[in-house]
Image (spheres, grey):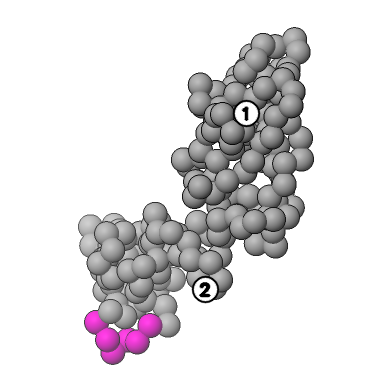
Amino acid sequence: LERLGSGDANAPEGWCASASPLPSGDFGTPGAALGECFADLDGDGYTSDDCDDRNPDVHPGAKEQADNGVDDDCDGTVDERPPAKGDLVITEIMQDAHPVSDPDGEWVELQSLATVPLELDGLALDDGGSSTTIHTDLLLTPGAVVVLGAEGDPSKNGGFTPDLVYDSTKFQLKDSGEKIQIKLAG
C-alpha cells in the first residue's frame, strides 16, 4: 500500500494499492517517490488517469464546473466553461472561396474575448437556414482564435488546416447577405 499524498494516513481512503512494479513481481516504491495507484478509491470508475481519486465528481469525462477552482475533468485546465454572451466574436469568414469550390473553401474564425478558457463543445454556428454544432471537446484559451472549416484537406480547401472540421452538408455559407450567429444550447 502507498499513502496518498497529504491524505489522512489513519483513514483507509488515505492509502492505495501500488501500481509500480518491482523486479520480484510485487508492487511498491521502497526508498523512492510514491508511484501510481491501482485502486479506484472514490468509486467513479477511473484509476491512474483520475487526477483526484478522493472525489467521485472529479475524473476524465466529468463536466467542468465554472468558478470552483477545481480541474473537474482532469484536462490540466481549471475552470474552463461554456461561452457566455459576449465571450466570442466572429473575426473572419470565407463565404465565397476562389479558386476552390463552395463549400470546400468555406470557414469561420472565432476569437475568445473571455478571461478564462472556454469549452466549445455544444457551440453551434447558425445562419437562419442551416446550422452545425461542435460535438467534441475544443478548448479555446483567452484571446486565442479557432478556425472552423468545411473541409480539412488543405489541397481541397485553399491551403489551410482548420482547428475543427464541421459538417458542410448541415451548414453552408451563402456568398453574400448572410447573418451568422454563434449559439449555445439554443
Percent position of residue 23, x then y:
29, 57
* Residue appearing at x 64%, y 56% in the figure: 85
Magenta stretch, overall SS: loop
Q: Secondary structure at mark 1?
A: strand
Name the one closer to the observer, 64 or 74: 64
Location of residue 177 by image quarter: top right
Is label 2 in a helix, a strand or a loop?
A: loop
Residue 11: x and y, percent?
27, 86
Residue beneath label 1, please?
149
Which residue is tagged 2? 68
Q: Give the residues in magenta.
A: 7-12
| Separation of marks 2 and 1 at Cα, in angstroms | 33 Å
Within the image, what quadrant is residue 49 found in? bottom left
Q: Quadrant of the N terminus?
A: bottom left
Q: Is residue 75 visible?
A: yes
Q: Is residue 82 left or right of residue 24?
A: right
> Alpha-carbon neighbours of circle 2 within 10 Å: few (<14), some, or many (≥20)?
few
In the image shown, does 70 or 112 lie closer to the viewer? 112
Q: Name the residue: 55% across, 41% down.
A: 124
The amino acid on which the numbered mark 1 sits, given as a three-letter code, is Gly
